[in-house]
Amino acid sequence: MFKNDLLAGKRILITGGGTGLGKSMGRRLVELGASLVICGRRREVLEATAAEFNAAFPGRTMPLTCDVRDPAAIETMLDQAWAVGPLDALVNNAAGNFIAKTETLSPRAVDAVLAIVLHGTAYMTLAVGKRWLAEERPGNVLSIITTYAWTGSAYVVPSAMAKAGVLALTRSLAVEWGSRKIRLNAIAPGPFPTEGAWKRLVPDSNLDAVWLHKVPLRRYGEHLELANLAAYLLADGSGYINGEVVTIDGGEWLKGAGQFNLMEMLSDAEWEAMRQRR
Ligand code: HXC
Ligand code: NAP
């Protein structure tokens, strides 16, 4: 759906770019001409992904280990990235999450998620943003959130708190940094199966069918659909979009929200019987 050189010349850092949706976005961005820096905690995972991308597009993907919870490690990584050339965009994709009854969570369990998602995203955004501001360079930050950033969700409470915070960060800095040519947006994906999310959040395969029923389009998202949306928001052609969150969920969250949406459970005979009773 795009010209192959849509992102030619752009250098984009993707946190958590070695696996799942980060990897799928990276594959598409590099295909569209971008150079990548991908980071995460596991070196072997990053190196395997970079080797795969570099086999198709030599020299365009640089794997750097970095724990986004560690501001000093972020500076080291950015020094290494900037030594090759300045970044044009940051994709805040790294996350941690699990399902649990909230009353069973220890303080460390709450912190484990908040530290990666909320603090890690803030540290990354500030570290990259400060460099752009100092160099008077335009920048683009895209954060991957969730639809429960605004609906909230039972059983993933630290994640909901953290993603809501990332949305607030996005909207706040879109205004504060906009006049200095740095824009910030977010994508809120619905269900896109990945190993990382599914083993923690959909551990019972019976839940799969229930989950699909929550989506009006009755299917999961395809990684390429999300990757194309990310490419659009990272391209200069979307340059007037700032402070926005784009939902890509097949209508899932609206289905949960609409007061009468549950009426889809009625059969045609039941609808007819109701009509007769009026
Ligand atoms: C209750 C749990 C728990 C669980 C960990 N803890 N898992 N408590 N239920 N399932 C508690 C531990 O007991 C410990 O507390 C504390 O959390 C820290 O655990 P660690 O294992 O030491 O944490 P850490 O090594 O920092 O790992 C962070 C993590 C892990 C979040 C727990 O899962 C991780 O690294 N995840 C990264 C990838 C990931 O989560 N991907 C999915 C993203 S999907 P105590 O008190 O016992 O010491 C996503 C999509 C949402 O966000 C929408 C999908 C549709
Ligand atoms: P995933 O494969 O588990 O991705 C998480 C990535 O984050 C991993 O590569 C992980 O690598 C990295 N990471 C975790 N903690 C880190 C840290 N402290 N420092 C640096 N990197 C860290 O899961 P995913 O499904 O692709 O999720 C990607 C994003 O999409 C997340 O923001 C998630 O919330 C969002 N999302 C996913 C879905 C879905 O249906 N899949 C739906 C809504 C939103 P290491 O473990 O090697 O560090």
Image (tube, rainbow, N blue to C red):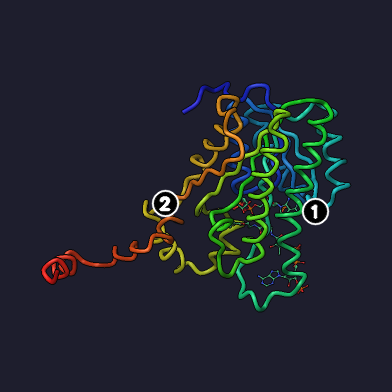
Q: Residue at x 58, y 41 (%)?
A: 24
Asked whether mark 1 lies closer than 8 Å to ligand 2, one says yes
Q: Is residue 218 above or below residue 244?
A: below
- Where residue 186 sits, quadrant-wise, is top right
SS class, disc 2: loop
- x and y percentages locating residue 43 in the rendered image: 77, 47
Q: Residue at x 43, y 55 (%)?
A: 254
**172 or 127, nearer to the observer:** 172
**253 or 218, nearer to the observer:** 253
- x and y percentages locating residue 63 in the rendered image: 75, 39
What residue is disc 1 on? Answer: 69
Q: Is residue 243 above or below residue 98?
A: above
Q: Residue at x 57, y 37 (%)?
A: 230
Q: Is residue 29 left or right of residue 58?
A: left
Q: Which mark is residue 172?
A: none
SS class, disc 1: loop
The amino acid sitting under disc 2 is: Gly
Give me the C-alpha separation between circle 2 and circle 1: 33 Å
The image quadrant where one finds the C terminus is bottom left
Asked whether mark 2 lies closer than 8 Å to ligand 1, one says no
Mark 2: few/some/many CA within 10 Å (<14, 14-19, 20+): some
What residue is disc 2 on? Answer: 251
Where in the image, quadrant-wise, is ligand 1 located? bottom right
- x and y percentages locating residue 105 in the rendered image: 69, 74
- Where residue 38 sits, quadrant-wise, is top right
Furthest residue toward bottom:
103
Q: Is residue 24 left or right of residue 248?
A: right
Asked whether disc 2 touches disc 1, contact meaning CB atoms under 8 Å apart, the reply is no
Q: Residue at x 24, y 67 (%)?
A: 266
Between label 2 and label 1, give the one nearer the viewer: 2
